[in-house]
Image: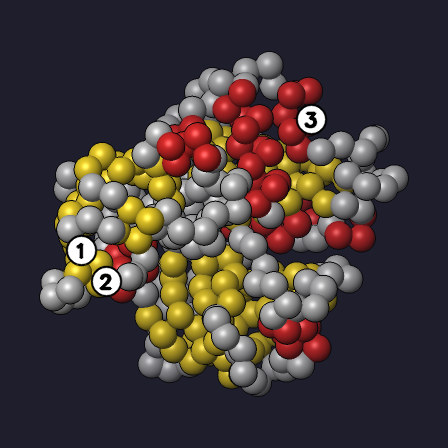
């Protein structure tokens, strides 16, 4: 437990209590002490860590304006990944439930590159193996931070599969214009190289319930969405599941064989492909995910969703799901914003 000297006290859902050192962000302090709170991106873009301040005051910090609105801030909400306490004691009520179970302990270790191959012109499949004596375990939907030479801060990537018993970690890495980290991975990282890994982080999970499940994935947002649905199906989940994979053109489609195998193996799973900016061999028309949702679902009351992609994609899909009757607590999201020019 962090020393309470020169610290503030945070009470979450009237159940969890921990200290936050002067000037530190609430979520960072919680994670450093092993306190599990709902969160995913840690960059003010997914909204998973949103909470209402019921007592005390916070400095809301920086926000993209996507995960939290000015109106919500005025109503007393904050993002725990950005907020700093300014009163001696702050009580918070989270929008998303606190994940149950012990979870997997965060650890830092070295990993060796086993495979770094292109899946599309913009995305590479990076497979790492934890070096002995590390034994890496994580739940589907988690992410890790990679320490790359000369680059700070560490970069975050969602797990594309549930880590296997032999310590394999699979990631999908998109190249971003001017991105030093993605450029290093795409152009320089070779099999046999070592990278530092810290994790797992994140609480993006399959929402509890018995209703049908929608997986909405944009680009490399396919990684967490597919891993969560694949893990649930492999563990005998019989819910009806539909994964909607949205890309700009056919060249960006990836992991098609994995999707097809999953559909063949599980009658309760199907997938749909959306192409938004070009003619497609697979789609009859250009279409965005919110349009597909409105066209295929008159109501989503009782349904659940796992959404992965850019902040704009996640916000548009979440808003549409809620407009169609889905409960906000039935939505789990994974959204990441690239670090500018890094």
Residue 61: in sight, yes or no? Answer: yes
Residue 263: in sight, yes or no? Answer: no
10 Å crowding of disc 2: few (<14), some (14-19), many (20+): some
10 Å crowding of disc 3: few (<14), some (14-19), many (20+): few
- Residue at the (60%, 34%) spot, across then down: 316
Residue 92: % across, % down: 24, 40
Do the residues bearing badges 2 and 1 touch, measured as CB atoms within 8 Å? yes
- Residue at the (36%, 74%) spot, across then down: 108
Question: Judging from the image, what secondary structure is the residue with disc 1 in?
Answer: strand
* In-front residue for pair 32/286: 32
Q: Earlier in the sequence, mark 1 or mark 3?
A: 1
**Which residue is disc 2 drawn over?**
22
Residue 228 placement, left or right of 126: left
> Which mark's residue is nearer the viewer, 1 or 3?
1
Tell me the number on the disc at residue 8: 1
10 Å crowding of disc 1: few (<14), some (14-19), many (20+): many
Q: Quadrant for the C terminus, please.
A: bottom right
């Amino acid at each position: 437990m962090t020393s309470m000297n020169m610290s503030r006290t945070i009470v979450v859902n009237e159940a969890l209590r921990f200290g936050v050192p002067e000037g530190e962000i609430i979520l960072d302090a919680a994670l450093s002490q092993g306190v599990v709170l709902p969160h995913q991106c840690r960059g003010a873009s997914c909204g998973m860590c949103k909470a209402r301040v019921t007592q005390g005051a916070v400095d809301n910090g920086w926000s993209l304006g996507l995960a939290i609105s000015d109106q919500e801030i005025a109503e007393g909400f904050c993002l725990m990944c950005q907020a700093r306490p300014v009163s001696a004691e702050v009580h918070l009520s989270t929008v998303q439930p606190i994940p149950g179970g012990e979870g997997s302990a965060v650890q830092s270790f070295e990993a060796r590159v086993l495979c770094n191959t292109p899946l599309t012109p913009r995305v590479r499949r990076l497979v790492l193996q934890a070096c002995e004596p590390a034994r890496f375990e994580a739940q589907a939907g988690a992410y890790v931070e990679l320490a790359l030479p000369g680059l700070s801060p560490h970069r975050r990537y969602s797990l594309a599969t549930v880590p296997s018993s032999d310590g394999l970690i699979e990631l999908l890495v998109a190249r971003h214009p001017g991105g030093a980290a993605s450029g290093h991975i795409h152009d320089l990282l070779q099999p046999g190289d070592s990278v530092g890994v810290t994790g797992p982080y994140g609480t993006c999970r399959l929402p509890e319930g018995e209703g049908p499940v929608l997986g909405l994935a944009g680009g490399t947002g396919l990684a967490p969405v597919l891993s969560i649905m694949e893990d649930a199906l492999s563990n005998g989940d019989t819910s009806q599941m539909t994964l909607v994979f949205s890309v700009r053109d056919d060249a960006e489609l990836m992991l098609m064989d994995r999707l097809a195998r999953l559909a063949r193996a599980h009658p309760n799973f199907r997938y749909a492909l959306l192409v938004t900016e070009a003619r497609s061999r697979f789609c009859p028309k250009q279409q965005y995910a919110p349009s597909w949702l409105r066209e295929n679902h008159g109501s989503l009351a009782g349904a659940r969703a796992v959404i992965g992609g850019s902040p704009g994609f996640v916000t548009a899909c979440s808003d549409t799901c809620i407009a169609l009757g889905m409960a906000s607590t039935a939505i789990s999201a994974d959204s990441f914003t690239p670090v500018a020019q890094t």
